[in-house]
Structures are given as structure tokens and as C-alpha cells.
Amino acid sequence: MRLTTRPILMGFMLITALIITPGCKGRGGGGASTGPNSDAPVQLDLQIRPLTPERTGITVRYLVTVTLMDRNNDVAGGRSVMRNVTTGQPVGEFTLTAADLLGDCVTRCTFQGGLTRVNPPPGRTDFAHTVIDAAGNRSAEISFFVNTAQAELPRGAIPSEPSIEWKPAR
């Protein structure tokens, strides 16, 4: 008498299918999505350009240019969010208007923001930028850093209180 494993294998596959199928919920299976949100904006690039010397004791200004795409084109009405990774503190956010966005965001658009640091500390400071569209979908963060040189203050000068601001470059 010769036994084959084919009926055993078929029975095992049927039992496995019956156990797994009730957990599926359609449109991608059960549970939370493990992949990126396809409706979220995608930051393609972030460029930062200092507009003043990068040193302590003064107000340092940067122009930040963000390039992104958003396949459902609902970035206008969303927000640009900047945080200081070094301190863990939020820097600020502003609402993106249609006038801020240059180009067609379905394929590629840009906007600019101004980062201002009053009397920044010396050394490296890390930042992270996120775009949140009008529906609340959040892009992945883009991280960057700036280096600030230590400067000598003139005799008798009182340094300004350190502060930082993120706003649209309108």
C-alpha cells in the first residue's frame, strides 16, 4: 500500500485558510497599516541657506526651502512644523496657503520658511521639519542641523535672551 502526502498537504492548507480568513478585514487585511500613509505629503528635499553670519550674540536668519509632493494635492490649508531636536522643544508652525506653494504639488512643489535664532548657543543644533496636509496626514520628518560659532561680545554688551522662531517667508 502506497501513501501519498498530497491529501494531507491539501487538508493542512484548507485548515490554515479557514483559520486565517476570519481575521482579514478587506482592503489590505486586518489591523493597522504598517506601511506609509499613501495620502501623506512626501518631503523630497530641504535646503537651508544662512542669510546672516552664524555666530552667537546676534540674530541669525536662515531661508529654508522645502520641496514636496502630495498625490491628493491637499497641502494648502495644511501646516509646516519645525521642532528643535536638540532641546526637544517645538520651534513653531504655520499654515500653508496656496500662495505659499510654488508648482503643482501632485508632482513637485516648493515653499519657503524663515528660521530666526536670536543669540543662539554655540555648536550644533539639530532640527526636524514635518508637513501636515489639510486632512491631517503627516509626512516623514526631514532632519538637518546648523552650527553656530562662538563670538566675542563687545565690552559692556548685554546679550539678548535666546529665542527661536519659524514663520513663512512671505
Image (tube, grey):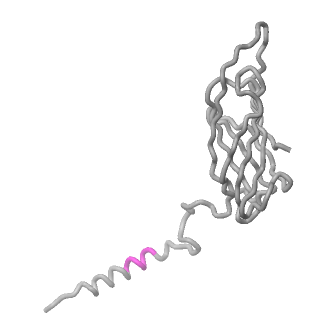
Residue at the spot 79% in from the left edge and 11% down from the top edge: 157
> Is residue 73 located in the magenta-colored stretch of the structure?
no
Q: Which quadrant of the view contains residue 109?
A: bottom right
Residue 88 x %, y %: 63, 35
Q: Which residues are magenta?
A: 15-20
Looking at the image, the residue that sits furthest to the top is 155
How many marks are shown on the rendered structure?
A: 0
Above or below — where is 40 with respect to 82? below
Image-based side of 144 in relation to 107, left or right: left
Q: Which quadrant of the view contains residue 107?
A: bottom right
Above or below — where is 82 with respect to 13? above
Above or below — where is 65 with respect to 148? below
Residue at the spot 80% in from the left edge and 41% down from the top edge: 167
For the N terminus, which image quadrant?
bottom left
Residue 127 x %, y %: 65, 38
Residue 163 x %, y %: 75, 28
User: In terms of depth relative to the viewer, which is nearer, 17 or 70?
Assistant: 70
Residue at the spot 69% in from the left edge and 57% down from the top edge: 41
For the C terminus, which image quadrant?
top right
Q: Which quadrant of the view contains residue 168?
A: top right
Q: Main secondary structure of the magenta part?
A: helix
Image-based side of 85 in relation to 165, left or right: left
Above or below — where is 41 with respect to 158? below
Looking at the image, the residue that sits furthest to the bottom is 1
User: In terms of depth relative to the viewer, which is nearer, 122 or 23?
Assistant: 122
